[in-house]
Image (spheres, rainbow, N blue to C red):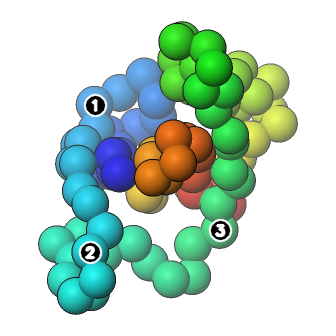
Amino acid sequence: MRYLYDYESNYKGDYSLSVATENDSGDAWIEIPDDATYEVFTVDTADEMGIVKTWRSIWEKEEAGELRRAYTYDYEKYHPGGEIEIYIAVK
């Protein structure tokens, strides 16, 4: 997973990025709040630009006022079967 957090302002500002994997032991070096609400975006993995296009769609929705981002923790989840989802924290 790729985690995006410590946002300076919005998606145009600086932020922190971490890469992590899930494991069976439950060890975690980054804690995502349990009470967060997310809008989930599914990436078209058949398109080599699928991740980029999905992020563009997210930014366009925000610019249009259709997505109220919380700018806390966002992450990309890469499933073993090849599926990719982008989780955006919302208000």
Which mark identifies residue 37?
Answer: 3
Q: Tell which tag, 1 or 2, sits nearer the viewer.
A: 2
Marks 1 and 3: CB-CB under 8 Å? no
Residue sitting at x 50%, y 83%: 34
Near-viewer residue (6 or 77): 77
| Residue 54 visible in rendering | no
- Residue 14 is left or right of residue 34, and the answer is left
Nearest to N terminus: mark 1 or mark 2? 1
Front position among marks 2 and 3:
2
Q: Which residue is mark 1?
A: 14
* Disc sitting over residue 23 in the figure: 2
Q: Is residue 70 left or right of residue 63?
A: left
Q: Marks 2 and 3, how far apart in space?
A: 23 Å
Image location (x, y in percent) of residue 17: 24, 42
Callout in the foreground (1, 3): 3
Could you tell me residue 88's position as x and y percent?
58, 49
Q: In this view, which residue lies farthest toward the bottom?
A: 25
Image position of 63 (left or right of 49): right
| Among the 4 quarters of the image, the one containing residue 49 | top right
Q: Amino acid at mark 2?
A: Asn
Contact (CB < 8 A) between labels 2 and 3? no
